[in-house]
Image (cartoon, grey):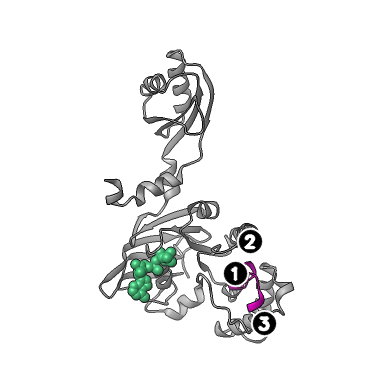
Amino acid sequence: MLPADSPVVLAERVTKWYGPRRAVADVSFAIAPGEIVGLLGPNGSGKSTIFRMLTGYLVQTSGRIEIAGHDVVEDSLGVRRAISYVPEDAPLYDHMRVDEFLHFMAGIKGLHGPKARAAIDEAADRLDLARVMRLTTGKLSRGFRQRVSIAQALLGDPKVLVLDEPTSGLDPHQVIGVRDLIQSLAGRHTVLLASHILPEIEKIASRVMILLDGVLLTSDALKDATQDQTLRLSVDASEEAVHGAAKVVAGVREVVADPEGAGRFLVRAQRRPSLAAELVSALVAAQIPVRELTELRPDLERVFLNLTRRPEAAA
Ligand SMILES: Nc1ncnc2c1ncn2[C@@H]1O[C@H](COP(=O)(O)OP(=O)(O)OP(=O)(O)O)[C@@H](O)[C@H]1O
């Protein structure tokens, strides 16, 4: 039995080579029970390769992976019971009815008879599948296909759910439905999901890891984003005057004109509780009356762009 605070997913210095090509390079991270963690990275950055290694579909070239305390190489059965994977565009055997498909998948997971029935009823209830249970999976909308994929993943009540691009190809209503669903899974399950769409992952995940060319650039991009603070100022003054007044405040890194309107400026600074008050004092002392001062949300997009800027693009 694992101590309650042990990570439920642990990757230590994991590397994967496909022949001469290195897809994942020395990646380490830990995920605590009940977290919803997003793995964000451009196409080809290695997200699916990491997922396939965590779920035992692929063996890492080096490094160690444990799921709920089970080593993926030494105890693959223990790993398969603890983790479920929903690949992007999961195959559903289009000729089967939804109830038949869920029975079939329950059998693969070692659930039979009343146990299978109870697990299927519970998953169908959680995923709101009652009205499609007797339809063939080939006739389902993309949103329902995704729900059925997640339902099969929940059979056997795995500790960890791994979802590859769970909202890809869905319409906006379906996206919201799947997003709410994933949030409702947290707590009982630990969720790891991949996306290359930043606003999407930002809405679902409680922690965001960023991967580029197989290298994990940060395992907590939201924390990185909150180390800095951006204030939006509305004043009647030139950029030069605002810059002159703001730069005397400790921690201010830059002042730029806000593209959203004249007389508005963005002040980026190291996060400090007294920053806004000091900034207002400095502006007033420079005879610049402040009409409005608001703090912007942590800028994950900026962290992502800074971290994933390739050397040739930065030059
Ligand atoms: N079976 C394979 N054989 C050889 N190279 C592969 C194989 N699978 C993936 N790769 C390569 O490994 C790298 C990482 O691929 P991977 O599919 O893990 O990335 P990804 O981040 O999931 O991409 P996407 O968002 O497009 O799904 C890519 O350069 C890819 O071309």
Q: Amino acid at mark 2?
A: Gln
Residue drawn at (37%, 79%) of the image: 74
Quarter assignment of residue 302: top left
Q: Is residue 102 above or below residue 224?
A: below
Are discs 2 and 3 less than 8 Å apart at CB?
no
Q: What is the distance, in whole Å, between disc 2 and disc 3 at their CAs?
A: 21 Å
Q: Which residue is mark 1?
A: 146
**Residue neighbourhood size for the residue with mark 2, other residues' Cα within 10 Å, grouped as few (<14), some (14–19), many (≥20):** some
Q: What is the distance, in whole Å, between disc 1 and disc 2 at their CAs?
A: 9 Å
Which is more N-terminal, label 1 or label 3?
3
Q: Is residue 48 left or right of residue 117?
A: left
Residue 190, percent across and down? 52, 63
Q: Amino acid at mark 3?
A: Arg
Q: In the structure shown, which secondary structural element does the residue marked by tag 3 occupy?
A: loop
Q: Amino acid at mark 1?
A: Gln
Q: Which residue is mark 3?
A: 97
